[in-house]
Image (cartoon, rainbow, N blue to C red):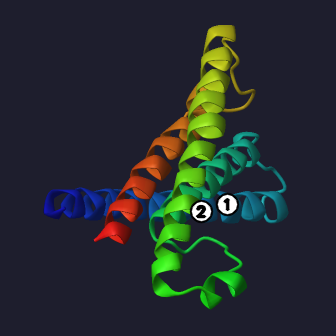
Amino acid sequence: METLERIYNSINKVIEKTLIVIFSLLVIDVLGQVFSRYVLSNSPSFTEEFARFSLIWLSILGMAYLNGQKAHLTMDYLYQKFSKEKQKKVSIVIECLIMLFALVVLIVGGGNLVYITLSLGQISSALHVHLGYVYAIVPISGVLIIFYSIYNILKERT
């Protein structure tokens, strides 16, 4: 469990720093777009697309990170009424359902989305990036969510 704890902490640090960088770039991009649009009366065409792609990465990677911190949105009114032993069992069931969702929707569905967009050669209009690279965060986050769910289950069992 100690090795898993180190891996968990390392992954958290990498994701935290990545999210900070993405958010910082998003803020700089939007501020630059506003400045160039209203002060210079000429906004670069790539800023809107970069903001959209940054927001996609920020929200989906943030979702995985919040799942790992158990800070996602929950309705726990009934959960709080359970005994501690029953809460552990319900938590494990919830983590299994989250893993199933991550596997089917994010990894399989997101992987297919990445594969299709890369094989079709879809390229963004302003940044000229393959859209498959933009969508790659979906299966990556799916893998992270499954790791976090396994970690949470093992932690719940001890």
Position in image of residue 116 (x %, y %): 67, 16
Q: Is residue 148 left or right of residue 48?
A: left
How far apart are labels 2 and 1 at the CA level? 6 Å
Identify whether 129 is placed above or below 94. Answer: above
Q: Say whether marks 2 and 1 touch (CB < 8 Å).
A: yes
Q: Is residue 34 left or right of residue 82?
A: right
Label drawn at residue 28:
2
The residue under label 1 is which amino acid type? Gly
Disc 1 target residue: 32
The image quarter containing residue 133 is top right
Name the residue located 81 percent from the left edge and 50 percent from the top edge.
42
Quadrant occupied by the C terminus:
bottom left
Label drawn at residue 108:
none
Q: Is residue 33 visible?
A: yes
21 or 136: nearer the eye?
136
Q: Is residue 128 visible?
A: no
Position in image of residue 33 (x %, y %): 73, 57
The residue under label 2 is which amino acid type? Ile
Please tell me how crowded label 1 is: few (under 14), some (14-19), or many (20+) other residues with Cα within 10 Å.
some
Name the residue located 64 percent from the left edge and 90 percent from the top edge.
81
138 or 33: nearer the eye?
138
Q: Is residue 3 left or right of residue 142?
A: left
95 or 53: nearer the eye?
95
Please tell me how crowded label 2 is: few (under 14), some (14-19), or many (20+) other residues with Cα within 10 Å.
some
